[in-house]
Amino acid sequence: MAAADRMIDLRSDTVTRPSDAMRRAIAEAAVGDDQYGEDPTVNRLQARIAELLGKEAALFVPSGTMANQIALKLLTRPGDVVLVGEQAHIMWLEAGAGAANAGVLFKPVGRGGLFTAADFAAAYQAPGHIVLPPTGLVAIENTHNFGGGLIFPQDEIVAICTAARAAGVRSYLDGARLFNAAVASGMPLAELAAPFDLASVALSKGLGCPIGSVLAGSTADIAAAIRIRRILGGALRQAGILAAAGLYALDHHVDRLAEDHDKARQLAERLASLPGVLLDPGSVQTNIVVIGLAPELPEANAIASRARDAGVLLSAIGPRTLRLVTHLDASVMECREAAEILSRVLDPQ
Ligand SMILES: *Cc1c(COP(=O)(O)O)cnc(C)c1O
């Protein structure tokens, strides 16, 4: 078994640790009480994200889950249906929070995390029906996590959000990995976020910050979001030490995401050549590789535990599905080494 400090950790891009330079930015941050609106570093980060996403205002929150929960409470009423892609984080990976906090139902549409304006139209339920719950919100994940880091086609996003607006349905972008989508597609963040009423981005995923997400939207929606953040216990005080990491990451960790995408593509090409590995390397667009295991291979948990013994950490996200995520703390060489280790682990001989 490899020593713990030599593990190549591809479970998630959340495992990164702040670099020395980021820690210096954190140490030197000017701070104040953010609940009085007096933390200058938080204010700078919020203004910068609002501008990047082309929205009027932005709000720092402690996690991507809280960003999603604030969006649900802000944009829906209890009993509303939220239309989402299959295996959406907001539906399935937040410990039931959408039902517990906002009292909503989720209806997955489309396939593999993606859906179309036709899927929206087919699933839409107008208010006023005697038994059926109304559609209150459409939520899109870009990139799609369990879909394998897929970039949601922007023309379809425009069509879905246009149809939603015409029907009086609000729209929300779960952009935990929107920076990956922007770098991989070459499209500006503001263009990716433009069709939506409200959008979030994570600082603690590919950008390599220890903590934080940011919501962006209209001045009125963000003002209402401030109260919901307080209700959920997410209003902070000298949060500038966290915002400083975000500002540092915006300057230094965005363009480099292309490297993470290259590493994921190389991993995918190596793994796709193995018998029993169900993966189209052409489908890998960003920093996530999701692979299916054919019946002749052991189950995902068994593969993950053998990989751990051989020095590679990855996630079993289904009985026969594994996920690997590249990030700034796993170098090109380490990702190559991981591919070689996994090719031995996955060899059925
Ligand atoms: C990770 C993730 C979240 C939640 O972020 P946390 O900071 O872990 O709460 C939300 N949405 C997507 C798509 C994610 O990948």
Image (cartoon, rainbow, N blue to C red):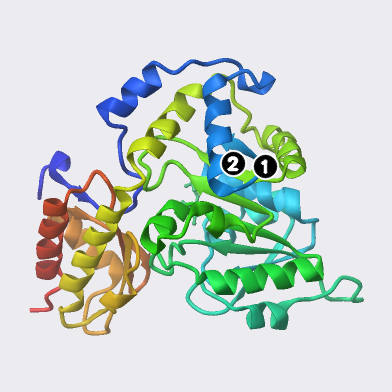
Q: In the depicted view, which residue is nearer to us: 237 or 254?
A: 254
Q: In the depicted view, which residue is nearer to us: 252 or 303?
A: 252
Classify 51 as above or below 30: below
Q: Residue at x 26, y 26 (%)?
A: 20
Q: Where's residue 7, x and y in %?
A: 17, 47
Q: Residues within 10 Å of mark 1 (few under 14, many from 20)?
A: some
Hey, which quadrant is residue 296 in on the image? bottom left
> SS for tag 2?
helix
> SS for tag 1?
loop
Q: Residue at x 66, y 55 (%)?
A: 98
Residues at marks 1 and 2 touching, judged by CB atoms closer than 8 Å: yes
Q: Which mark is residue 50?
A: 2
Q: Where's residue 100, x and y in %?
A: 69, 51
Asked if residue 263 can be seen in this view, the reply is yes
In the picture of the structure, the residue carrying the numbered disc 1 is 56
Q: In the image, is 255 to the left or to the right of 108?
A: left
Q: Residue at x 48, y 51 (%)?
A: 176
CA gap, disc 1 and disc 2: 6 Å
Q: Where's residue 328, x and y in %?
A: 26, 45
Q: Which mark is residue 268?
A: none
